[in-house]
Image (cartoon, helix red, strand yellow):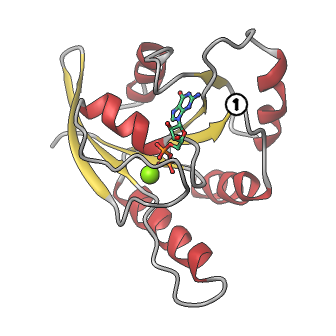
Amino acid sequence: MKPVLALVGRPNVGKSTLFNRLTKSRDAIVADFAGLTRDRHYGNARFDKHEFIVIDTGGFEPTADNGIYKEMARQTQQAVAEADVVVFVVDARGGISAQDHDIANYLRRLGKPTILVANKAEGMKEGAQLVEFYELGLGEVLPVSASHGQGIRDMMAQALAPL
Ligand code: GDP
Ligand code: MG
């Protein structure tokens, strides 16, 4: 069985862009507005000699005022349940949000191998802007740029290490 890696995080942090980068496909829909990906999305990926499966999350079909959040939570939970390792994506430019805290709390309680990556970190000076994400209590924050292809090797080395 190939290991399964789930990409989770609030809308617009770059999960689908990262999915495309890892799977080298254009399958996941990348949108300039939040939440276009309609449902969980699976792709095959490879890092060095390791083959794995990536799950993108983030589609939601709101049915009530807070339906968006319920659907996001449901998708995140299902993806995480299927995953061997979780890649929790936050936005290095947008900073930390209440939703990031909610997801982090959930992941910490779950106790699955989880790595924390701060996307959109291209051109940032190491450190300063990433310090706040240590509050999430998930350990080291790895800067990446999904769109520029930076930090991906380090991220994958960390992600696959526990497997
Ligand atoms: P998702 O909602 O988490 O799946 O996020 P998307 O992958 O759809 O990306 C949301 C927005 O962030 C899009 O406009 C992307 O082009 C942009 N984006 C994604 N990755 C990066 C990155 O590494 N750097 C920058 N500057 N923008 C990015
Ligand atoms: Mg998406």
Q: Is residue 52 left or right of residue 116?
A: left
Counting from the top left corner in percent of width and height, residue 21 is at 34, 29
For the C terminus, the image quarter is top left
Amino acid at dot 1: Ala
Mark 1: which secondary structure?
A: loop
Query: Dot 1: within a 10 Å radius of its alpha carbon, few (fewer than 14), some, or many (20 or more) residues?
Result: many
Residue at the (70%, 31%) spot, across then down: 92
Residue at the (84%, 32%) spot, across then down: 132
Counting from the top left corner in percent of width and height, residue 57 is at 42, 56
The picture quadrant where one finds residue 126 is: top right
Residue at the (25%, 51%) spot, across then down: 42
The answer to whether residue 4 is seen in the rendering is: yes
Residue at the (35%, 65%) spot, across then down: 39
- Disc 1 target residue: 92
Counting from the top left corner in percent of width and height, residue 97 is at 78, 51
The vertical placement of 60 against 56, above or below, is below
Residue lying furthest front: 32
Q: Is residue 78 left or right of residue 47?
A: right
Q: Nearer the viewer, residue 131 or 61?
A: 61
The answer to whether residue 86 is seen in the rendering is: no
Q: Nearer the viewer, residue 1 or 23?
A: 23
Question: How many marks on residues?
Answer: 1
